[in-house]
Image: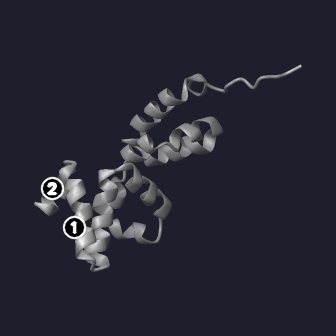
Amino acid sequence: MSIQKQPHSRLESLPQELQTEIISRLAKNSRKDVRKIMEASPILAIAAAQPQVYENINLRPLTIHPLASLRRYQDLMDRCLAAGNLKAHYIRGIQEYFHKNNTSVGLSHIKIAAQGLYDVGIYLYG
């Protein structure tokens, strides 16, 4: 006799694409809530680990203190950069330009943020 495991919530019973869309929208407001979802459910953790979520995840606290992610949040930053997150490009640009004195790499990241219409990137890049 085979026993199928039933989803614990209605959200878990939705198709993964829809779960990812919902989590992606949540990510725009709260990085911590995405982390809680990933910890709460293995099913939702898979949906939350998609590039769409990392593209939209809110990195505002790190844009205020971009040097904080030099030693912490490396995996998060790498995933966000790979997904095209504009705030991640801005943060990496600030780190490269001001902290590592790598102006060309820093400017290229800030340019990506500005071209994507991230307001602080536009202000800084011109």
The secondary element bearing badge 1 is classed as helix
Q: In the rendering, at what x and y percent does residue 123 appear? A: 13, 58
Q: Write down the residue under mark 2.
A: 122
Q: Classify 78 as above or below 97.
A: above
Figure quadrant of residue 39: top right
Q: Nearer the viewer, residue 30 or 126?
A: 126
In this view, the residue farthest toward the right is 1
In this view, the residue farthest toward the left is 126
- Residue 65 visible in the picture: no
- Residue 12 visible in the picture: yes
Q: Residue at x 28, y 60 (%)?
A: 90
Q: What's the amino acid at mark 2?
A: Ile
Q: Residue at x 31, y 58 (%)?
A: 89
Q: Write down the residue under mark 1.
A: 107
Q: Classify 42 as above or below 64.
A: above
Query: Is tag 2's residue or tag 1's residue first in the polypeptide sequence?
Result: 1
Q: Is residue 123 left or right of residue 83?
A: left
Q: In the rendering, at what x and y percent does residue 59 appear? A: 36, 53
Other residues around mark 2 within 10 Å, as few (<14) / some (14–19) / many (≥20): some
Q: In the rendering, at what x and y percent does residue 66 appear? A: 33, 66
Instruction: Please name which of the two marks, 2 or 1, marks the residue nearer to the observer.
Output: 1
Q: Residue at x 35, y 70 (%)?
A: 67
In the rendered view of the protein, which quadrant contains the C terminus? bottom left
Q: In the rendering, at what x and y percent does residue 61 appear? A: 35, 57
Other residues around mark 1 within 10 Å, as few (<14) / some (14–19) / many (≥20): many
Q: Is residue 78 left or right of residue 107?
A: right
Q: Is residue 39 left or right of residue 18?
A: right
Q: Nearer the viewer, residue 32 or 110?
A: 110
Between the C-alphas of marks 2 and 1, the distance is 12 Å
